[in-house]
Amino acid sequence: MILRRLYIYLVSIAALVVLAFGLALLGQTLLQLAFNTGDNLFNRTSLAGYTAAVVVSLPVWAIHMWFGGRFARRDPAERASAIRRLYLYLACAASSIGAAVALASTVAGATQQQLDGALFDELAIAQVAWVTIVLAAIWAFHYRIAARDRAAVGEVGASATLRRWYMYIALFVGLFMMLAGAQGLIWLAWLRGLHSELANYHTLSAPAGQLAGGFLLWAFHARVLVTRFANDDRRSELRAVEGFIAVAACIAAALISASQILYFSAAHILGVANPGGAGSDLLAAFAQPASTMVVYGAAWLLIRRRLARDAGTGEGARQAAMRRFYTNLAALVSMAALAIGAIGVLGTLLIQLEAQVIGVTAPDWKDPLSLWVTLLIVGGAVWLAHWRPVPWLEERQAISRRIYLWAALLGSVLGVLGGGIGLLYVVLQQAFSLRPRLDDPTNLGLAQSLAVVVVAAAVGLYHRRILRSDSTSRHAVPVPPEAAPPVTPAATADEPAHATQEASGLHYSLSVVGATEDDVHQALANLPPQASYHLKASDQPA
């Protein structure tokens, strides 16, 4: 059975690929002949090849799909098989993303005359529109078959996982197509409003098409997920992974754009004539980073809300895990920005110092220092807002926190490795030279490599210390709930908070008024690693 399924659907996918390319290129060639453009002899030769591909692949694909459908109607297990669903959802994913890209090109070509004043190329628009129609038809055919299979035999296990892979990949691609298009529109509209010459080298039609194609791809799959699969997918790991990857990309884009805005401002204050090649027009220089920060910052907040909403519908453990994962992910991305900024700042200062020592002309420091200081400030601010060095015990044991710590430690070790190689390279370059020179400008690379080593070592030592502290807390023996007096909110608001020490001096009873559970955890976060406590609300039985 499995071998038969593999044969049917492997042949089907191979024939479908040939058929899709053949139909697309055949239609484009026929349009060239209809518009009477190009070399007719070449077009007729191509027409023969594309026609042959369609005539051969179409019956092969149709016959095997008919056999697959016949077996599926006879046997529910065949209809629910993961191999059949793999074929259907692979075809849906490839054709839907391809159709969105082709639609973006179609909209861009159709609007370039109105938005950019360019010539209207009817042949190019018709050709790319034909490709859109072919891919959309392939997607609709396979999506309908998959929907019928779901309605007939349901979808659980591997089949549901394959459907999620298709939908969340399409959702992710559509989201970032849409964001990139929106950012491009805002950026160019800003430049045109300022009558900047930079707008002459870009077109509005391209981001408009990207926005349209990405929006349709994202909106359809988001709507289907909300209306049909909300309960099934709310606790799905793939949904969470897609959300966390998307939010990480949005955080990185927002941080970089915010640092660029501060960089241009600082460089302008310091008198840099052309910061980052952006010219002297500060408002025009703000256009790209400001549009990126607006679009991706808004997406960051919205995706964060979606993750919180997904977590809130589940049990408390899942909700806490999702919150921890987001917090540590934001801390990891911002730590990377902070470290890069620190390396740049320290490297710029060390280069100025080394240039004086070895007697060479120091490069300009205002422009690079403006860039790295702003990245250091933005990254540091976001990292401090999300990072807690000594959280409560459950937070310390979270897998997301350990991933953050080990990822930071790995990055620091790789940084020390790369910086050490750079240091040794500069030294050996002069040692192996026929005429070693102290005043060689290439020796300035020593300062930059030294900055990498120093910052990477500092980051590594800090996170190593946190990792050891967390490891110590994991080895502490927790007090059983019945042996530890509970920490309970008081029943009445007028009862003051108080603490009483038992005769042994080892156990405490604490009554807290007007605070949430998170507030209590944060207040007790500075307890030593060997200490433990048990929190129980007053309305719960003792």
Image: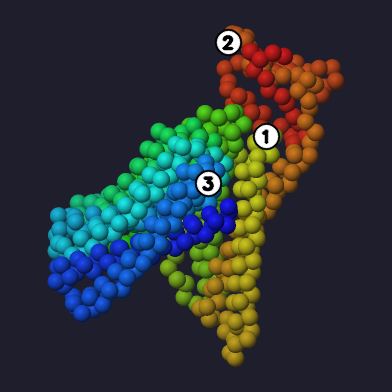
Which of the numbered marks, if any, corresponds to residue 496? Answer: none
Location of residue 448 by image quarter: bottom right
SS at badge 1: helix
Labels 2 and 3: the sequence-earlier one: 3
SS at badge 3: helix
Q: Are marks 2 and 3 in contact (CB under 8 Å)?
A: no
Residue 105 locus on image (x, y percent): 27, 58
Measure the alpha-carbon separation of dots 2 and 3.
Answer: 64 Å
Labels 1 and 3: the sequence-earlier one: 3
Give the number of the mark in front: 2 or 3: 3
Quadrant for the C terminus in the image: top right
Q: Residues within 10 Å of mark 2 (few under 14, many from 20)?
A: few
Labels 1 and 2: the sequence-earlier one: 1
Count of numbered circles in the view? 3
* In the rendered image, the vertical position of residue 35 relative to residue 385, given as above or below: below
Q: Nearer the viewer, residue 51 or 472?
A: 51
Which of the numbered marks, if any, corresponds to residue 394? Answer: 1
Residue visible at 63% across and 25% down?
520
Residue 379 shows in this picture: no
Residue visible at 47% across and 43% down?
73
The residue labelled by disc 3 is: 78
Q: Residue furthest bottom?
A: 434
Q: Nearer the viewer, residue 192 or 71?
A: 71
Which of the numbered marks, if any, corresponds to residue 493? Answer: 2
Residue 361 locus on image (x, y percent): 46, 75
Measure the alpha-carbon separation of dots 1 and 2.
Answer: 28 Å
Kind of residue indicated by mark 3: Glu
Q: Residues within 10 Å of mark 1 (few under 14, many from 20)?
A: few
Residue visible at 73% across and 26% down?
533
Kind of residue indicated by mark 2: Ala
Q: Nearer the viewer, residue 528 or 173?
A: 173
